[in-house]
Image: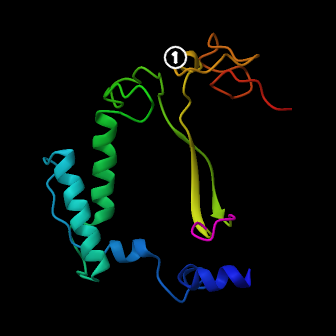
C-alpha cells in the first residue's frame, strides 16, 4: 500500500479529505450550451470546458457546467445509439433497437485497487446492458450450452439474459 500511496498521492489526499475531487472543481467551470447544438458541437464545448478546468478557470456559481454538458452528451448518444456492435442508431428513448436492450443497470461499483499502477484507486462502475442472446451467432460466437434466447424476460432467477446461474 505504501508503494501505491507514493504513486497516487492525489487520490489518497482526496480519500483523506485533504483535497477536493475533480468533479467539485468541474462544477465551478462555466460552459455555455443551449441544448440545440449538434453532438459534435457539444463534444467541442466539452473539450473547451476541460481546458478551462485544467487552467483552473473557475466561476463561483456558473449557470451551466461540464457535468450538465456530459448529461446532455449522454442523452444525445442514446438518441442515436451505437453502444453495441450493431450500431443501429435507434433512439433508445423510444425503442430498444436491434440488440433489444431496454435499460442498463449498475451491477456493481467500488473503489478499484487493481494491479496496474495507472488504474489504482479508480472508482469503477460496471453496467449490465442485458444484450439478448440472439446476438451471439451474429457476432461470430458459438452458442453456449444452457443459454436460451427463448427466455427474453428472464429465467426465474432474475437473470434477463436467460443464462443459467453459477451455483
Q: Position of residue 166 (x, y in %)?
A: 82, 32
Q: State yes or no: residue 153 in magenta.
A: no
Q: Quadrant of the C terminus?
A: top right
**Could you say which is closer to the camera, residue 157 or residue 31?**
31
- The residue furthest front is 140
Lateral position of residue 80 relative to residue 6, left or right? left
Relative placement, left or right, of 57 versus 103 is left
Give percent across and percent down for residue 161.
Answer: 63, 24
The residue furthest top is: 150
Residue at mark 1: 138
Q: Give the structural element (helix, strand or loop) at label 1.
A: helix
Which residue is painted at 36% across and 30% down in the image?
92
Q: Which residues are magenta?
A: 114-119
Q: On the picture, is 4 further left or further right than 13?
A: right
Q: Position of residue 59 (x, y in %)?
A: 23, 80
Q: Residues within 10 Å of mark 1 (few under 14, many from 20)?
A: few
The residue lying at 67 percent from left, 16 percent from top is: 143
From the viewer's perspective, is 112 left or right of 58? right
- Residue 117 in magenta? yes
Residue under the image location 70 percent in, 82 percent down = 3
Amino acid at each position: 500500500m505504501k508503494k501505491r500511496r507514493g504513486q497516487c498521492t492525489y487520490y489518497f489526499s482526496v480519500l483523506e479529505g485533504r483535497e477536493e475531487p475533480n468533479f467539485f472543481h468541474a462544477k465551478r467551470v462555466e460552459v455555455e450550451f443551449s441544448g440545440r447544438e449538434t453532438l459534435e458541437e457539444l463534444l467541442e464545448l466539452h473539450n473547451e470546458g476541460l481546458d478551462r478546468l485544467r487552467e483552473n478557470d473557475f466561476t463561483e456559481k456558473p449557470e451551466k457546467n461540464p457535468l450538465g454538458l456530459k448529461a446532455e452528451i449522454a442523452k444525445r448518444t442514446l438518441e442515436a445509439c451505437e453502444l453495441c456492435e450493431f450500431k443501429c442508431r435507434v433512439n433508445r428513448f423510444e425503442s430498444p433497437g436491434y440488440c433489444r436492450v431496454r435499460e442498463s443497470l449498475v451491477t456493481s461499483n467500488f473503489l478499484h485497487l487493481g494491479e496496474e499502477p495507472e488504474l489504482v484507486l479508480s472508482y469503477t462502475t460496471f453496467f449490465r446492458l442485458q444484450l439478448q442472446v440472439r446476438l451471439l451467432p451474429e457476432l461470430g460466437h458459438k452458442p453456449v450450452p444452457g443459454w436460451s434466447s427463448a427466455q427474453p424476460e428472464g429465467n426465474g432467477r432474475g437473470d434477463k439474459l436467460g443464462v443459467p446461474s453459477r451455483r
